[in-house]
Image: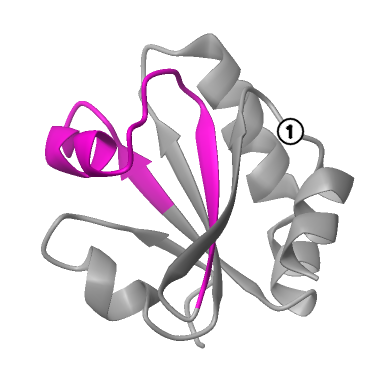
Amino acid sequence: MEQKLVDLTASTFDQLTKQGTWIIDFWATWCAPCRMQGKLIDEHLDELAAAGAAIGKVNVDEEPELAARFGVMSIPTLLIFKDGAQVRSFVGVQTIDTLKDAIQ
């Protein structure tokens, strides 16, 4: 996978996440914990990619249908997908070690 960080939309979500391991970050620009989580992910993007994950970002203000589809009630919410199936979920800011463990 060439891109390590992808902005996902309702029209691209299923196609892009159907293969491989993905960490999906549901966030919003006005959310301070989301910005903290985003910074952690950005700083460790190469590390997460080396562990085998692509990162998808979903802005809940721009993609409310995706947030509703996955029952996102609080942000940041991180969902782990493997070959199109959701396998884990986290609410709140997570450490990089937690995310790396979740994708193993």
In the picture provided, is 73 more to the left or to the right than 80?
A: left
- Number of on-image labels: 1
Q: Is residue 1 left or right of residue 13?
A: right
Q: Is residue 83 left or right of residue 62?
A: right
Residue drawn at x 46%, y 22% as measured from the top left = 75
Spot occupied by residue 5 in the image (x, y as percentages of width and height): 48, 62
* Amino acid type at mark 1: Gln
Quarter occupied by residue 14 = bottom left
The image shows residue 89, relative to residue 21, as above or below, that is above
Residue shown at 22%/43% (left/top)?
69
Across and down, in percent, residue 83 comes to 48, 81
Residue 102: give x, y in percent of width and height: 76, 57
In the rendered image, residue 1, in percent from the top left (x then y), is placed at: 51, 88
Residues shaded magenta: 57-82
What secondary structure is marked by label 1? loop
Q: Is residue 27 left or right of residue 101?
A: left
Is 3 drawn above or below residue 90 in the view shown? below
Q: Disc 1 designates what residue?
A: 94
Q: Is residue 67 magenta?
A: yes
What's the residue at 53%, 83% (across, down)? 20
Asked if the stretch drawn in magenta spans residue 65, the answer is: yes
